[in-house]
Image (cartoon, rainbow, N blue to C red):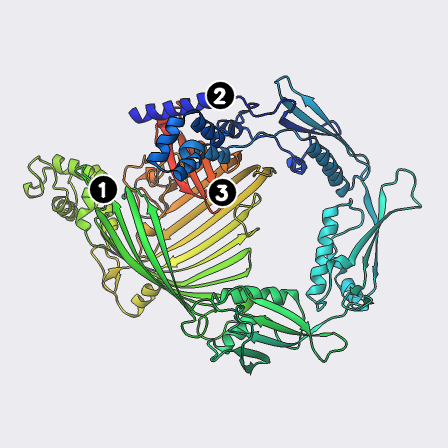
Amino acid sequence: MKCNFVIKALLLLCLFSLSGCSPTKKVPEGAYLLRKNDINVDGKAPKNSHVYGYLRQEPNSRLLGIPIGLLIYNLADDQSEENYQKWLERHPRWHRFLDGFLSKKQTQRLGKSFLVSGKDRLLQRMGQPPAILDTAQVNKSTKVLKAYYNSVGYYNSKVEHDILPLEKKKEAAVVYSIEKGMRYYIDSLDTRILSPEIDTLYKKHIGERLIKNHTHYSLEKFTNERSRITTLLRNNGFYNFQQSAIDFTIARDTIAYNNDSLINVTTTIANYTDRSTDPPTEKTYKKHLIKKVYLYTDYDSSLQTTTYDSVEYKGITYYYRNKLRYRKQTLYDAMALRPNTLYRDIDRNNAYRQINNLRAFKYPNIQYRYAKKDSLERTLEADIFLEPLSRFSIETNLELSRSSIQEFGIGFNTSLIARNVFRGAETLEITPRVTLGAQQFLDGTSAFFNIFEYGGGLRLTIPRIWFFGSIESLIPYSKTPQTILQFTTSTQQNIGLDKQKTSGVLRYTWSPNTQNRNILELLDVEFVRNKNPENYFRLYRSSYNALNDLAKKHNAPAAVMDNDGNLNDREGAIAYVIWASKQGGYAGYPQDTKDLYNIFQRYYRMTKNDLIMATSFTYMSNNTFNYYDPDYEQFRVKVETAGNIPQLLSIVRKLPKDDQGQRKFLDVTYAQYAKAELEYIKHIPLTIRKNGGEVFAFRTFIGFAMPYGNGKSIPFSRSYFAGGSNDNRGWRAYSLGPGSSGSPLEFNEANFKFTANAEYRFTIANALKGALFLDAGNVWHLMDDEENTDYKLDSFSDIADVALATGFGLRYDLNYFVIRGDFGMKLYDPSKYATHHWTNELKLSNFVFNIGINYPF
């Protein structure tokens, strides 16, 4: 209650502070604050709001009609340092005291401190300065709008603007009125190409032309066509071709009638001008052949002169100092450039990508020059300069964490990186890791750094597909393939059941381009050993309470009870659940027997050691390289199977079984399941602004893991949960589902998950962003050994178990990452009675606060 009161008081204080500040407080006399921009196209609002992005001046951002960013900025004192100096002049005694207590220099520096002026600089950075109406920018906006409508075929468009002072003093609106007029369409296409070689190639690919007859004029299409032609030519030998050689001549049809809107387009590709001669001469574009390739493996830009040794390998001349430190084949595969081949831009770009994939050199430098004995200038020689990275390097990281078990954690890890370990540009990383944390014990006491986790990892990255035989025909080096061998181990102390994890992965990755990525984990082995399974009923109190009620009801043996008549939550509870299960439950009490069985099954599943031997494939596709682009789009699909290798071995050789009838491999029960996931993310820009604009973002995810063969359930580490900062934000992590069960356990999970999220993102002030969101989803048990119908998805009516949450979020963009705080509230809770599913009370206490780094999707 006290916490809620404090939060409410702070919110009210902030609102009063902002409301008491006038938006026009810092608007000079005679000037106006730009309140809004309006655009009318033929008397109507524009169909697409992107035209607002062409305006050169924007009003201050508003949230629910309130310019919060501007009000925050107005709270700052623009002259805090000057006022401090004036205060010192008015109070000489204080001035002398500060000089004596600090020093004259420190007294002056005090004016730049946070207490004096720093807080004002912070408010200015967080806020937005007033958008003072600038008539010069308005005139520029008018011209830019005219240019835009010209660019989409409205050559006769008219654009005017009006500045309208508003009733509020010192505020004004700008209205841009646009008459589009008649639109122009392409009637005929012609070409004029001076180079015979270019003319032949152009006509061969004329079907790829982006400019079509009977379509309206679009400057964007002409720009894209110019880029297409340039790319086509430079990928077919025309090394010195310049985009400026392409020109489009546009003329109206002279035979047409009045008001005719048809235009004729002529594509001209001129010769190039050689300015190295005096006077400059005009030459015909011709194809170029790469005659020789020279590779410098130890280039050092800091050395003026140096002596190189050389060796030739498959037509490439390698230059090195003292000793060639890399395998010739490794560098040959990464080059992409080959002697006696036609020049292609795509080969040059692939060379950059493939060399960077080696992770052994700084950004490469590739230069071309004409062969010395080529008077016709048709053959090239390529020089590739590679500057090696340091052979060894060390990176240290500090991480802060918080989880449902760990109240606070601080992690330290140091990575020792060794490059070119086997002369094939391999990278070896050795990473020891230590985490210290704090958690509250069951008796309510806590101590700082009372939990401990340590471990390490070994990772070897090979810049090629390491496999039996050559598969270059399937995955060429242009797809930047990598093989990753990884081994990790970790041991916990005073954390849950004190798990000891050991894992090993053989992973292959390749990317045809920057937008698509493939990941094949041929072998993913994970072994989890619970060192303290006797802690189970001390940690999972819901299971203990249910078992304790059964023990009391059915008169459990005194040996398993404590002095208060309750089950001993350590050895006693474990002994009782095993003993009662072996007895077949409770005769005459079928529901109690079923509850006992469920408790035992969960105890067995959560405490048994797990062995997972999985294989998975993941495909990811993005439409852009930058996640923060307003039109970002991603599609991801993953399939995974586990347990097939030991299952095949069990056919050849009988493997032993555990108490539950499941087979064991290396004396550990192995999991067997199949798993599939689909995820789609889309960002849709609603308005384009210089400070970010508005974006609608949504994400859908569906995942299903089905046990089969030796598996009765999905291992906890591979199952699904709902809730949390990146999921359904009205619930804490693991506290939603399964189904309509009401989350009776501490860690609720299942083998089927559906999630859908939508966010409306907007800018409040500069780096301060806001969001309104709606989350939907849940987890269910599907096609496994769960018997409780509330937990399961077994009919179409179970769609009613999809939980809904809504809320708002604040995000602060620090350029490198985003700090996020989301306030989520349950909107529809499937665990409630039918008449109470929907939330009808808006209380601060109903909101769940989630902290996250970067956007949730």
Quarter of the figure with residue 846: top left
For the N terminus, the quadrant is: top left
x and y percent of residue 459 in the render? 37, 64
Quarter of the figure with residue 378: bottom right
| Left or right: 345 in relation to 298 | right
| Left or right: 652 in relation to 691 | left
- Residue drawn at 72 percent across, 51 percent down: 223
Residues 30 and 460: in front is 30
User: What residue is shown with label 3?
Assistant: 699
Q: Earlier in the sequence, mark 3 or mark 1?
A: 1
Q: How far is mark 2 from mark 3, CA to CA?
A: 36 Å
Residue 527 can be seen in this image? no
Amino acid on which disc 3 is placed: Arg
Q: Earlier in the sequence, mark 2 or mark 3?
A: 2
User: What residue is shown with label 1?
Assistant: 540
User: What residue is shown with label 2?
Assistant: 19
Is label 1 in contact with label 2 (beta carbons under 8 Å)?
Answer: no
The 10 Å Cα crowd at callout 1, few under 14, some 14 to 19, many 20 or more, is some
- Residue drawn at 65 percent across, 65 percent down: 345
User: In the image, which is nearer the foreground, mark 1 or mark 2?
Assistant: 2
Residue 739 vs 425, above or below: the answer is: above
Is label 2 in contact with label 3 (beta carbons under 8 Å)?
Answer: no
